[in-house]
Image: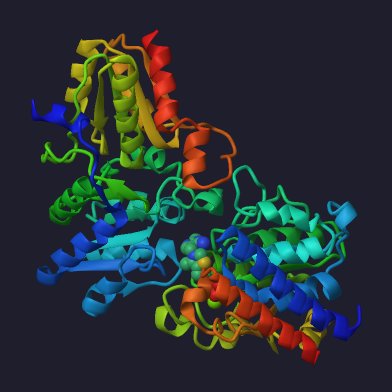
Amino acid sequence: MELDKIVEKDLKMGSANQEIFAKTLESLAATDKSIIVVTSDSRGSGKLVPFGQKFPEQIVEVGIAEQNLVGVAAGLASAGKKSFAISPACFLTARALEQIKNDVAYSDNPVKLVGISAGVSYGALGTTHHSLHDFAVLRAINNMIIVAPADNFETEQAVLLAAKLEQPIYLRFGKKPMPFLSEENQEFEFGKGRIIRKGNNLTIIANGETVYPAWQAAKALEEKHGVSAKVISMHTIKPLDTALLDELAAEGKPIITVEEQMVNGGLGEACASYLFQKGARNRFHIIGIPDEYTVTGSQGEIFNHYGISRDGILAQAETLLK
Amino acid sequence: MTDKELKLKSVFLRKNLLKYIYKAKAGHTGGSLSCVDILNVLYNRVLNVDPSNFKNPNRDRYIQSKGHCVEALFVTLSDRGFFPESDLETLCQYQSHYIGHPTKKVNGVEQNTGALGHGLPICVGEAIAAKLDKKEHRIFTLLGDGELPEGSNWEAFLSASHYKLDNLYAILDNNKQQITGSNQEVMNTDSLRDKLEAFGWSVREVDGHNLADLDEALNNGPFEAGKPNFIIAHTIKGKGISYMERVLKWHHGVPSPEQYDLALSELDATEALI
Ligand SMILES: Cc1ncc(C[n+]2csc(CCOP(=O)(O)OP(=O)(O)O)c2C)c(N)n1
Ligand SMILES: [Mg+2]
């Protein structure tokens, strides 16, 4: 299979996913005048300054007022606009949660919610600026697709698909440049996990910016122990790719999940809930941010501290394979 | 502290906040420079707080709603003896309590802020509690002008006048700018004074870089019995460093070595004139 080649070559570096989001939206907005971006003093962080300059009629600024941001985006969507509400993930999904629940999801207004600088991207700015709850709270809301793309390819595809979607969606992006993780596998569909590296001794399921360390850990497992680990980018947390999980259950090999999220209610628990209710017997471990005051530091330091890293995942894999 | 010493203190605090932003390679420079005179007056002329007994229930409260300007707060607190200045060497480092927003892990910090629009409602709660307990202490908050559109502020404006919280002082760092542009471009709050008065507040306007004006306003409340106090402090974002004043990118810009040296020499010149 083509996929096996990926191991051999070094990864090509790309841009930050949120930059690709902005560029993709810009290209769509040039021909689709129904696209309206809504910002809350967030266009700079969202890389949307050029968008605002090119398409001043297609950007609505509400000031620092995230509840208003989501409410306005819901109204625009209700009136037939393709509205994208952009704000740091922490404020968007906490401050405006009731607007998301009632005005977007429950009222079925197909707003595209875009959480930028997600997870612990803001590092030393601390907990007020981290979004470690967004998977959990949005998973608990009906009628919401939740997507955290791993690389620039997935990001571009997700934005293109979201623009056509008639249903509420949450897209979650980080601000660190990401390598292209799988150039051979050029398929992308919401709700279908992407196998970005084949393997049969162990599976690592990750999403967003944690797919890269998962990939690095798989490579290290191969080099160090001759163990082949499958890496899955589970970019869509809801709806979850249960068919793929069924395959993993049938294989019965250990599974590690990795996420830039508190472990309570995130990707790992979503997978575990499905698998074990289905009677799966796989050994299973969730890597994420534990339920404690998050250690302070940069995103990289926080990742290392909690083992959301090549070495952390490798160590966990070694334990599960014992 | 004499008036002259207070003025010198403002220069010292500016130098210090730039020093630690420069070292940490991160920080909210423009907004820290615009509010540092207010903090200087608060901590050296207004607030009844004791660094060695910070938790005294009778202390005045200061909750910084515009938490991103934590550097101005940290240098003011360390200068007042709440913690050794050397602690700030760890600003924004792994496992340090000195992060990019106020946290209660630091002696002297009342509340964990950083998400805008949270300070005022907490102050309303503190002010109601003080009234219930028949206590004399006052409650202060510092708001950013870009922060005003958060709905929670307007909810709290209503509550504060409803509960006649004349022990509450909201100070607006009115530097007229935020991240994307001017308040006027992003979201105007025109006729702010009228709006606030219509919400039942007593409003005064001061030059937010004039220490004597700030001192006078902040020490002479309540402005009207039974009404919460609002101080519109007219300020300049980046105040004190010529190339930073009113320049948007300094919202969270970090000076280069050359820019840092230039900033210090400008502050030396200011100091020499005092
Ligand atoms: C709820 C919330 N939304 C967005 C932000 C991101 N943010 C940090 S500072 C800032 C601009 C603040 O402008 P202003 O209140 O005028 O502050 P100042 O000019 O005094 O720095 C923004 C949007 C935040 N910290 N909290
Ligand atoms: Mg401002």
Q: Position of residue A235 (x, y in %)?
A: 26, 38
Q: Position of residue A19 (x, y in %)?
A: 29, 59
Q: Position of residue B19 (x, y in %)?
A: 66, 67
Q: Is residue B61 visible?
A: no
Q: Is residue A204 left or right of residue B154?
A: left
Please determine whether, in this image, residue A314 is positioned above or below residue A28: above
Q: Is residue A128 left or right of residue A191?
A: right
Residue A92 figure quarter: bottom left
List the single residue furthest toward the bottom: B273
Please determine whether, in this image, residue B70 is positioned above or below residue A15: below
**Picture quarter with the N terminus of chain B:** bottom right
Q: Is residue A244 left or right of residue A170?
A: left
Please determine whether, in this image, residue A92 is positioned above or below residue A264: below
Residue B21 figure quarter: bottom right
Q: Residue at x 81, y 87 (%)?
A: B212
Ligand 2 is found in the corner quadrant, namely bottom right
**Picture quarter with the C terminus of chain B:** bottom right
Q: Residue at x 26, y 34 (%)?
A: A234
Q: Position of residue A226 (x, y in %)?
A: 28, 15
Residue B81 figure quarter: bottom right
Q: Residue at x 76, y 78 (%)?
A: B10
